[in-house]
């Protein structure tokens, strides 16, 4: 028996041939790939040292329609729009381009097929730790950085672009970036002075609406002009955008209007609890800016 990192160890019943347990091989103890192996079991996530018996065999990436442990094979073109890459894929592609490596070069370093690497970059995916470690080693980075383990840090700590371009956004693009709902920030003057609060918001008929609790600080926005800001920072590419809406905040009290907002709300406030006061902001000024790499 011979294996390499990222292979799957499958233990089957000798009587029926049905798989009883499987896991990803994340550690080798011999250069020729012979047992024993460190295996991360799929059912528990634990890593144990395994001396495979006659009821076990190694499954390599690409066998049985799989490209790697726990990952489906790349989809064939069906004429539909491709899925957007996930956060891992974007970080992976950016790290590869930053080092000037092709798909084939990176795949060779990481001991995987270029097709699977392309799949990881182009589709939402969550590869096993063995795959992440191999890719991090191939790209001279860390598994924590590649997997986004530093995402709890304040945004914007990455390096600025060498040649950034700051452009103003028109009202139509600002509305498009606001989309239908999300998380934004309301800037207002509360009892203790200026304050900024994140809120779950919806866009209904070009109005920005959010729910809060009567008596909460966010409710102090009612009857005043406020600023509402939404942004996105792409740590991988050091790019981003922001949209700022300014308008008067009003309480929505009409029963039909409250019912209609409740029906059209895309999600409940993440903070939980009863939040019965709907606040509406009708923008009188909508501006935005975007940072991108300058074309050279």
Image (cartoon, rainbow, N blue to C red):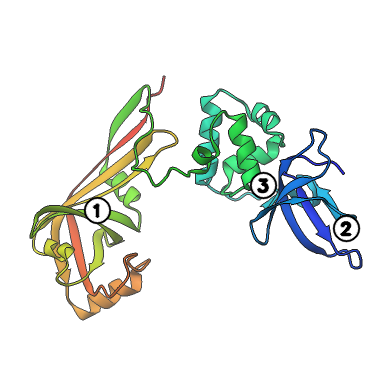
> Label 1, label 2: how many angstroms apart (C-alpha)?
58 Å
> Label 1, label 3: how many angstroms apart (C-alpha)?
40 Å
Is disc 1 in contact with disc 2, using a CB cutoff of under 8 Å? no
Asked which quadrant contains residue 13, the reply is bottom right
Asked which quadrant contains residue 261, the reply is bottom left
Front residue of 273/210: it is: 273
| Of callouts 1 and 2, the N-terminal one | 2
Q: Is residue 2 left or right of residue 269?
A: right
Residue drawn at point x = 82 percent, y = 50 percent: 51
Front residue of 121/157: it is: 157
Q: Badge 2 is on which residue?
A: 55
Residue 190 in picture, x, y percent from top left? 10, 58
Q: Is residue 235 left or right of residue 75?
A: left
Find numbered disc 2 in the image and state the secondary structure of the residue it sits on: loop
Instruction: Give the number of the mark in front: 1 or 3.
Output: 1
> Label 2, label 3: how many angstroms apart (C-alpha)?
38 Å
Instruction: Give the number of the mark in front: 1 or 2.
Output: 2
Residue drawn at point x = 19 percent, y = 66 percent: 279
Q: Badge 1 is on which residue?
A: 185
């Amino acid at each position: 028996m011979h294996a390499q990192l990222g292979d799957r160890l499958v233990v089957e019943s000798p009587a029926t041939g049905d798989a009883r347990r499987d896991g990803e091989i994340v550690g080798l103890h011999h250069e020729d790939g012979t047992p024993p192996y460190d295996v991360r079991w799929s059912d528990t996530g634990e890593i144990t040292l395994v001396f495979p018996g006659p009821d076990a065999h190694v499954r390599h990436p690409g066998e049985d329609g799989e490209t790697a442990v726990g990952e489906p094979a790349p989809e064939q073109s069906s004429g539909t729009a491709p899925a957007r890459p996930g956060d891992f894929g974007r970080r992976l592609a950016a790290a590869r381009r930053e080092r000037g490596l092709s798909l084939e070069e990176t795949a060779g370093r990481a001991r995987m097929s270029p097709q699977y690497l392309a799949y990881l970059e182009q589709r939402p995916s969550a590869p096993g730790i063995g795959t992440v470690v191999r890719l991090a080693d191939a790209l001279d980075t860390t598994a924590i950085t590649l997997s986004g383990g530093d995402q709890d840090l304040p945004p914007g700590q990455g390096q600025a672009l060498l040649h950034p371009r700051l452009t103003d956004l028109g009202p139509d693009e600002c509305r498009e970036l606001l989309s239908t709902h999300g998380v934004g920030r309301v800037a207002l003057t509360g009892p203790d002075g200026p304050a900024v609060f994140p809120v779950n918001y919806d866009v209904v008929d070009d109005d920005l609406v959010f729910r809060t609790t009567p008596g909460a600080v966010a409710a102090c926005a009612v009857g005043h002009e406020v600023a509402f800001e939404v942004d996105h920072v792409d740590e991988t590419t050091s790019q981003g955008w922001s949209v700022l809406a300014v308008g008067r905040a009003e309480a929505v009290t009409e029963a039909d209007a409250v019912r209609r907002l409740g029906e059209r709300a895309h999600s409940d406030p993440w903070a939980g609890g009863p939040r019965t006061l709907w606040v509406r902001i009708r923008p009188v000024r909508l501006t935005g800016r975007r940072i991108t790499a300058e074309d050279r």
